Amino acid sequence: MRTSSVLIILAAMTWSAHAQLIGDTRCKDSAYVSKMLHVIVQNLQQISEAIETVPPSEADYIREEKRLAIEQQNETRFSLVMSNRFYYPFAFHDDYTVVKDNLGAATRAHGKDQVRFLIVVLSRIGDLQSSMGDYINFDSSRPKSVLNKEKRQDMYFSMPVAKGRLTSLLQCIISQL
């Protein structure tokens, strides 16, 4: 209980520190924005690297079976897909790829185009946070977890910090348009 309270307080402090960026003229400087985006990318990359990768053949199988189960509205088939040992790492990495690709595009873009990519990232980071939580729950229930307790706590802290940084940076960029 105490650890989660400390994490909430630290996240709130980080959020408030980043909220100071609104109206900051440094957001007109592409080098500054690029640096801030790089920090967010690194933060999310560290989370991604902690989650095991999925063999391409398994990813293809999960993607196709999930598509068919949804198309057929077949709950049993979807449950079978979810019981695959790679389903939760796949779901996380699939969401991560969308976020990473749009962060990369935002890094190369400027002005309104940059804002457009960052809005996609902001809208998808909630999915990423959810799939991370699902993965952690799945991993914790395995006989031998991939993540230790410290890494799980770090991930639970890092994701909202990345989201706070992104939100603050986006507000800052918009305030300078």
Image: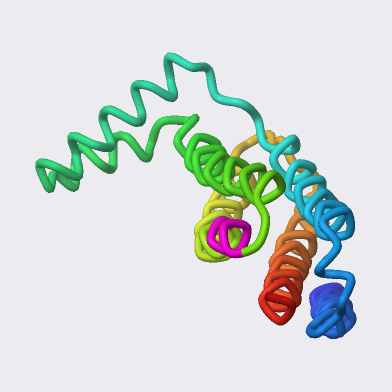
Number of on-image labels: 0
Quadrant that contains the N terminus = bottom right
Task: Mark yes or no: residue 129 visible.
Answer: no
Closer to the camera, 14 or 112? 112
Which residue is at a point 49% across and 30% down the rendered structure image? 86
Residue at 76 percent of width and 48 percent of height:
41
Image position, residue 53 (x, y; %): 62, 26
Q: Nearer the viewer, residue 22 or 90?
A: 22
Residue 164 horizontal/vertical position (percent): 74, 72
Can residue 146 be seen at all in this image of the molecule?
yes
Whole-percent x, y for residue 40 in the image: 78, 55
Q: Residue at x 14, y 42 (%)?
A: 71
| Nearest to the observer: residue 88 or residue 60 | 60
- State left or right for residue 61 relative to residue 69: right
Q: Is residue 45 left or right of residue 16?
A: left
Q: Can you tell which quarter of the image residue 61 is in?
A: top left
Query: In this view of the protein, which residue sits in the foreground, 26 or 46?
Result: 26
Q: Name above or below for residue 7 compared with residue 110.
A: below
Decide if residue 63 is on the left or right side of residue 67: right
Colour basis: rainbow
Q: Residue furthest top?
A: 57
Residue 112 occupies quadrant: bottom right
Q: Which residues are magenta?
A: 112-117
**Secondary structure mostly taken by the magenta-highlighted segment of the chain:** helix
Image quarter of the C terminus:
bottom right
* Residue 38 image offset from top left, x and y in percent: 82, 49
Q: Residue at x 65, y 62 (%)?
A: 111
